[in-house]
Each structure stands twice: as structure tokens, then as C-alpha cells.
């Protein structure tokens, strides 16, 4: 599945502050303007609340300037800096994201979600060892966080530490039984290790949890086709691509941690005339 999942969930999790905005109907003082720091902070938190609400609806371009102004009005709020860092991360402005997230961490070193976001920033910059360091620190504060465990598994996977990756994915599933992305990624690892049967079993489990999960459905289709169960493999592949045609893009699959072996087999699968014809006749529901 798309690995922006952690970021979006963190943005949605940001608390919406209950702040009453000051009244603006008072008469203006003609010669001096007195700025009340507490009122400015309230306005900043109110703006942050607005930005967080916009982020929940994925209106990031509208949320970002509000969050930027909020940090100026409420510079001592770690949550406001965290929000700004998350929005920068969503926009792939990684340097700005790291600066904002580090500011949030300085203000509140005990916020595990900030460390998870720093891990996400490092991962997207392909700094996988740094991602491991941040994610491990976050898990010390929030050891039962399934998405943190999942992200750590992904970082281990990119470092080639496949046994460690599977261990983290299994821990994520132990914390949240229906967390199919971790089950899916165990399948990805097993396929690269040459355990095609084991990979298929994992993908079957993932699809059983979510019948609309296009990623494990396509992976299972490819694996079954390669093993010789061609009709079932083709049917699963067609169904997966009707659900979400993005998985027919090898670049997208690589971004979602599909390894070289599976990518090679998927390339051949996607070139089959039946799959090509099906994609032409049945555009993905996601694109309609």
C-alpha cells in the first residue's frame, strides 16, 4: 500500500484545540497598539486548528500557510510545529519538514509521533539508517504502535535486514490483528527470499482481511501465474487492477517496496495480452 499512510494518520491524530478567538469589535486605540502575547497564542492555536481540519480533508495547500503563521503566533507549541512539519513532509519539502519536526522535538522530547515523522522524513530521503534510529527512539516512547513497528520493518527491509524486517512486521500484526499492510510486506520479503509459497500464504491472509486490497491481490496473482496456476493468477490480476490501476505502474510498485524479483515477474505479467486488454476495457474504479 502507499507508504504515506503513517503521515496522514499522524496529521489526522493532531488534537484540535478548543480555543475561543478574541472579539474584534472593540474601539481601536488611536496612538498605541498593545499586543497581548496570550491572545496572539490563542489566535495561533486557532489557525493551527483550522490547518489540522484542512489536512484531514487533504487540502494541504490551504493548510500549509495557516500552519506557518500559527508557528509565528504560538512558537512554544510543539503540536503546532509538529503539524507544520507534517505538512512539509506531505509536500515532500524534506529539509523544511526536518527543521520543524526538530523544533517540535526540542519543545517536547517525549512526543513519539514526532520521532515517527522524523523517521518518515529520513526514509523518504533514502536515509534508512537514520530512519531506523528515529523509529527505534519513537518506539521506546510508544512501544505498542503498530504503524511505528511497520515503518521500522520497512527501514530494515531497505537496509537488506530481511529477518529483522519480518520480525517487526510480525510485531505490528501482533499489536493489530487486521493490519494487513504488514502481512502484505511479509509476503514481499518472502518472495525476494525465494519462498513463493510462503509469500502467497501471506497475501491470501491480507486479502482475507480486506477484499479491496489491490496490492496483495496483484502480488498473489503474479505469484500464482508464475507457479503455473495461470487462470486464477490472471483473474486476480485483473481484479486488482480494476480496483486500483496504479499498481500497474512498475515505478509505483517499486515505491511501495516491491523487490527486484517480484518486479521482474510483474513486468512480464503486465505485458500479457489478456492483462493489457483488461486494463484498456476496464479503467480502475479509482480513476473514474
Image (tube, helix red, strand yellow):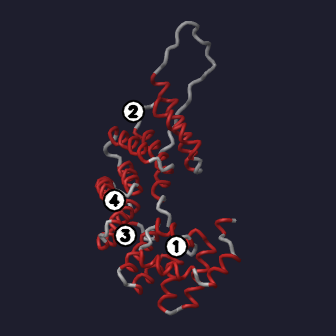
Mark pair 4, 2: CA separation:
30 Å
Q: Which mark is residue 121?
A: none
Residue nearest the observer in this picture, 286 or 250:
250
* Residue 63: % across, % down: 56, 42
* Residue 73: % across, % down: 47, 29
Residue for badge 1: 215
Judged by depth in the image, the label closer to the viewer, 2 or 1, is 1
Residue for badge 3: 169
Judged by depth in the image, the label closer to the viewer, 4 or 2, is 4
Q: Are marks 4 and 3 in contact (CB under 8 Å)?
A: no
Of marks 3 and 1, which one's residue comes earlier in the chain? 3
Of marks 4 and 1, which one's residue comes earlier in the chain? 4
Mark pair 2, 3: CA separation:
36 Å
Within-10-Å neighbours for mark 3: few <14, some 14–19, many 20+: many
Residue for badge 2: 76
Of marks 4 and 3, which one's residue comes earlier in the chain? 4
Amino acid at each position: 500500500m502507499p507508504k504515506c499512510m503513517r503521515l496522514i494518520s499522524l496529521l489526522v491524530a493532531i488534537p484540535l484545540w478548543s480555543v475561543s478567538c478574541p472579539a474584534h469589535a472593540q474601539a481601536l486605540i488611536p496612538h498605541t497598539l498593545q499586543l497581548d502575547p496570550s491572545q496572539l497564542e490563542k489566535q495561533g492555536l486557532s489557525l493551527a486548528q483550522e490547518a489540522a481540519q484542512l489536512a484531514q480533508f487533504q487540502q494541504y495547500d490551504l493548510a500549509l500557510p495557516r500552519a506557518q503563521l500559527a508557528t509565528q503566533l504560538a512558537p512554544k507549541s510543539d503540536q503546532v510545529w509538529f503539524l507544520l512539519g507534517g505538512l512539509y513532509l506531505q509536500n515532500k519539502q524534506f529539509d523544511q519538514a526536518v527543521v520543524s519536526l526538530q523544533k517540535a522535538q526540542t519543545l517536547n522530547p517525549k512526543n513519539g509521533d514526532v520521532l515517527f515523522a522524523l523517521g518518515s522524513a529520513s526514509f523518504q530521503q533514502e536515509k534508512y539508517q537514520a530512519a531506523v534510529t528515529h523509529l527505534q527512539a519513537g518506539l521506546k516512547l510508544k512501544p505498542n504502535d503498530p504503524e511505528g513497528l511497520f515503518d521500522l520493518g520497512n527501514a530494515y527491509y531497505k537496509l537488506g535486514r530481511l529477518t529483522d524486517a519480518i520480525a517487526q512486521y510480525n510485531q505490528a500484526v501482533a499489536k493489530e490483528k487486521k493490519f494487513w499492510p504488514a502481512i502484505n510486506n511479509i509476503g514481499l520479503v518472502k518472495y525476494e527470499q525465494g519462498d513463493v509459497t510462503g509469500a502467497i500464504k501471506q497475501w491470501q491472509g491480507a486479502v482475507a482481511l480486506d477484499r479491496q486490497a489491490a496490492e496483495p491481490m496483484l502480488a498473489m496473482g503474479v505469484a500464482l501465474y508464475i507457479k503455473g496456476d495461470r487462470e486464477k493468477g490472471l483473474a486476480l490480476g485483473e481484479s486488482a487492477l480494476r480496483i486500483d490501476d496504479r499498481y500497474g505502474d512498475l515505478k509505483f510498485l517499486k515505491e511501495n517496496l516491491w523487490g527486484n524479483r517480484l518486479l521482474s515477474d510483474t513486468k512480464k505479467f503486465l505485458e500479457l495480452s489478456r492483462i493489457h486488454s483488461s486494463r484498456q476495457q476496464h479503467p480502475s474504479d479509482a480513476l473514474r
